[in-house]
Image (cartoon, coloured by chain):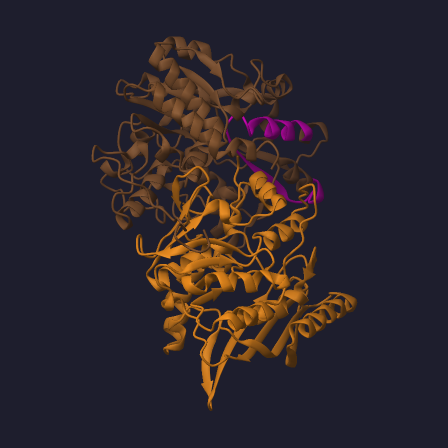
Chain colours: A orange, B brown
């Protein structure tokens, strides 16, 4: 299936459009067509969320992320929480427990100091929960009208434990695909406040740091194959990235994917697919079949993995492609989202 | 979701499929009119579960697909003008016009906004009295009444800086046009349930009689669609050609009189162009003379814009079931979902895009059965399985 938005976009765009930041095919084209050739070097060949660098004898995961969310505060968190957890989770997907963060604020002239303070406090609190220290920072102010109040960039580092090698290239047919809990909550929470939509019950963001959950999984076995946090583009984008990079196919059982009722309802109303909606406190893991039971049990024993579920497996057939087996027994292709998901007309 | 999960129940779906298999004795070609039904069919893999005798032809009922290129170009022109706030439902922003789309207009500084209701656009007009606010009013009988209501409200509240760019179309004339084609292969229709919830079913008995086709008003959930197929096949097998309502929880014979009254007040029936098909007489609406000052085409003087579809696009034939998507020379080469030439490849609900995806799956999975609308005589191999049988996790 294409992302279930009616039209498909033009290519070869002379200007940047929102879809270039949507985490889908347009984002990938921007990286492959503009950034990677300009920067050069082998490190960018990996399209993982964090780079692995070696300094002395240490293997470090290094990642950066920028946060431009509106509104600044939303049910379940704020831009401050996201700024910590986003980068912490990118590092965690390399198996690293984040140790140090940088934090750059770009403030818009006119934003209330109190709002900045509240964001900073939320950021500090999130860092303490995640067990990461904010050790350097920067502040810039842009003229009124040239920003959305507050933008934040964080970069982070963490040590990758010995014996841990998390890469999509390690995925082999037979690997079991596990998701750590219900999907789609962050995207729907943001949409509900941003667009003033009400879905009967308040849906809160799942924004959370995943370092502890990853540690619990690695305590079972260091032989996990790949982890991803399905943020922009949702679970569908993460699965497609892994399928493409590994050269294996992925088959998921649609009914096994945990979707909270409220998220399902909201998506039904808007014509969206929960598979494409952003998460901020979930991971998807490809685990060797012999370890899958134990890893699943360890995940379920952790507060952030209580809703973990096996949703499918890696297969030899249709390499590079993600296929969903529907509740009725049919199949459909789950394609890479092109840009941002858009509400359908009817 | 209450009343949704029940209509996706696999056991009940299995029973309906068994009944359909027991009923069908020969090949039948059915058209599901609405893009929402196409979406559901593909989303749930329904076409792969039906017996091979039943071919589903995807109809011209995706509002985004059938909005003509000319109208998209008018939207782009208006949205590019200084002082305009152009409001639209989200999925129109990506539709390619001649060389660009609304996203690109926004990237070039145009004020293009996604709204969830035309009334949101009216509120924006109230809040920005020094700007011209335009709402892109496209779609079928389902989206037309709220758009009519919005124009009515604008007049009532004297909000002069609001206008509607109208490209509304009607289903019954499209069914008539499809059936009038000498090469038409459609033998039964699943009528669009939500359209009938507004308009009722009064327009359909004459169509069923004139063209000797069963027309079954059908909903959108998997069980709704299977029930629609079951009833249509049952009629065909019995030699009946009548209108049935298989979506009684939403549709009454008279429809929604208040919505119909609003349509009559604000709009008048007009010829409309359908992307991929061409002009169909009396197949749409335009703002009536009383509301002409809220007509964006008139206000922004874009009546003269005339664009042409790529000549190599044969989506009109595909929409009528006259051509298999892969029989088009452009299919999969110069025309793909990522760079579509026409309506049926523009939309993920279009037959070409659906077929393209299944062919991709077919290529990666030997023996995967393509959709019924694209099935060849090469047989029906086993579908992909993702069974965890044998796994300790099963």
Q: Residue furthest right?
A: A114
Q: Quadrant of residue B183?
A: top left
Q: Quadrant of residue B373?
A: top left
Q: Residue at x 61, y 62 (%)?
A: A304
Residue B5: image location, x then y, percent = 56, 35
Q: Residue furthest bottom?
A: A56
In the rendered image of this protein, does residue B283 appear above or below residue A180? above
Q: Quadrant of residue B150?
A: top right
**Near-viewer residue (B90 or B166):** B90
Residue B101: image location, x then y, percent = 45, 47
In the rendered image of this protein, does residue B245 appear above or below residue A151? above
Can see residue B300?
yes
Total number of numbered labels? 0
Q: For this view, does B126 lie left or right of residue B172? A: right
**Near-viewer residue (B303 or B284):** B284
In the rendered image of this protein, does residue B192 appear above or below residue A233? above
Can see residue B320?
no
Look at the image and give the residue range highlighted in magenta. Answer: B126-153
Q: Residue at x 50, y 78 (%)?
A: A61
Quadrant of the frame with the N terminus of chain B: top right
Residue A239: image location, x then y, percent = 43, 57
Residue A289: image location, x then y, percent = 41, 61
Query: Is residue B44 part of the magenta span, yes or no?
Result: no
**Near-viewer residue (B265 or A321):** A321
């Amino acid at each position: 299936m294409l992302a279930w938005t009616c039209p498909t976009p033009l290519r070869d765009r002379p200007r940047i459009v929102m879809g270039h930041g949507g985490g889908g095919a347009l984002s990938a084209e921007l990286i492959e067509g503009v950034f990677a050739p300009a920067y050069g070097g082998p490190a960018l060949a990996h399209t993982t969320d964090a780079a692995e660098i070696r300094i002395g004898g240490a293997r470090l995961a290094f990642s950066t992320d920028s946060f431009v969310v509106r509104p600044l505060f939303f049910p379940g968190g704020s831009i401050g929480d996201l700024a910590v957890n986003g980068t912490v989770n990118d590092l965690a997907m390399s198996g690293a427990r984040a140790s140090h963060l940088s934090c750059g604020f770009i403030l818009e002239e006119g934003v209330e100091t109190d709002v900045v303070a509240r964001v900073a406090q939320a950021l500090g609190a999130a860092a303490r929960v995640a067990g990461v220290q904010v050790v350097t920072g920067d502040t810039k102010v842009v003229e009124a009208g040239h920003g959305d109040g507050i933008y934040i960039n964080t970069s982070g580092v963490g040590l990758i434990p010995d014996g841990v090698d998390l890469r999509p290239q390690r995925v082999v047919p037979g690997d079991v695909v596990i998701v750590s809990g219900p999907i789609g909550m962050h995207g729907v929470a943001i949409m509900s406040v941003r667009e003033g939509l009400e879905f009967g019950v308040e849906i809160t963001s799942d924004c959370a740091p995943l370092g502890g959950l990853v540690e619990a999984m690695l305590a079972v076995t260091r032989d996990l194959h790949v982890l991803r946090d399905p943020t922009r583009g949702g679970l569908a984008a993460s699965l497609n990235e892994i399928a493409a990079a590994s050269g294996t196919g992925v088959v998921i059982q649609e009914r096994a994917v945990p979707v909270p009722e409220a998220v399902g309802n909201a998506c039904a109303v808007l014509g969206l697919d929960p598979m494409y909606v952003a998460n901020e406190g979930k991971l998807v893991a490809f685990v060797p079949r012999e370890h899958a039971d134990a890893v699943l049990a360890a995940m379920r024993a952790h507060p952030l993995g209580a809703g973990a579920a096996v949703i499918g497996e890696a297969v030899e057939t249709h390499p590079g492609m993600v296929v969903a087996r529907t509740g009725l027994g049919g199949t459909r292709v789950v394609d890479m989202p092109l840009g941002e998901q858009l509400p359908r007309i009817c | 979701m209450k009343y949704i999960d029940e209509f996706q129940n696999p056991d009940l779906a299995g029973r309906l499929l068994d009944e359909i298999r027991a009923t069908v004795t020969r090949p039948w070609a059915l058209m599901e009119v609405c893009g929402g039904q196409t979406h559901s069919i593909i989303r749930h893999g329904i076409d792969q579960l039906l017996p091979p005798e039943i071919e589903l032809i995807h109809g011209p009922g995706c509002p985004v697909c059938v909005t003509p290129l000319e109208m998209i170009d008018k939207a782009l022109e208006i949205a590019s003008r200084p002082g305009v706030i152009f409001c639209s439902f989200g999925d129109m922003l990506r539709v390619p016009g001649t060389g660009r789309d609304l996203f690109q207009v926004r990237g070039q500084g145009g004020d293009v906004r996604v709204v969830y209701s035309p009334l949101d656009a009216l509120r924006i007009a109230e809040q920005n009295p020094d700007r011209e606010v335009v709402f892109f009013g496209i779609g079928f009988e389902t989206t037309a009444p709220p758009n009519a209501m919005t124009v009515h409200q604008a007049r009532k509240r004297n909000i002069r800086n609001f206008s509607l760019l109208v490209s509304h179309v009607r289903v019954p004339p499209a069914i008539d046009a499809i059936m009038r084609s000498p090469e038409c292969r459609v033998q039964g229709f699943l009528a669009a349930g939500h359209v009938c919830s507004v308009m009722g079913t009064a327009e359909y008995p004459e169509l069923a009689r004139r063209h000797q086709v069963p027309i079954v008003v059908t909903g959108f959930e998997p069980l709704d669609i299977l029930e629609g197929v079951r009833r249509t096949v049952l009629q065909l097998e019995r030699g009946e050609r009548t209108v049935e309502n298989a979506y009684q929880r939403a549709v009454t014979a008279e429809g929604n009189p208040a919505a119909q009254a609003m349509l009559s007040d604000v709009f008048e029936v007009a010829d409309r162009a359908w992307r991929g098909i061409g002009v169909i007489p009396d197949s749409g609406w335009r703002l009536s003379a009383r509301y002409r000052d809220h007509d964006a085409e008139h206000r922004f003087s874009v009546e003269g814009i005339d664009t042409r579809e790529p000549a190599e696009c044969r989506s009109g034939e595909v929409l009528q079931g006259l051509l298999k998507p892969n029989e088009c020379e452009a299919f999969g080469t110069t025309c793909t979902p990522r760079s579509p030439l026409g309506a049926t490849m523009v939309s993920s609900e279009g037959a070409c895009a659906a077929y393209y995806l299944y062919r991709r799956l077919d290529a990666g999975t030997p023996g995967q059965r393509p959709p019924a609308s694209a099935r060849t005589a090469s047989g029906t191999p086993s579908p992909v399985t993702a069974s965890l049988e044998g796994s300790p996790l099963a």
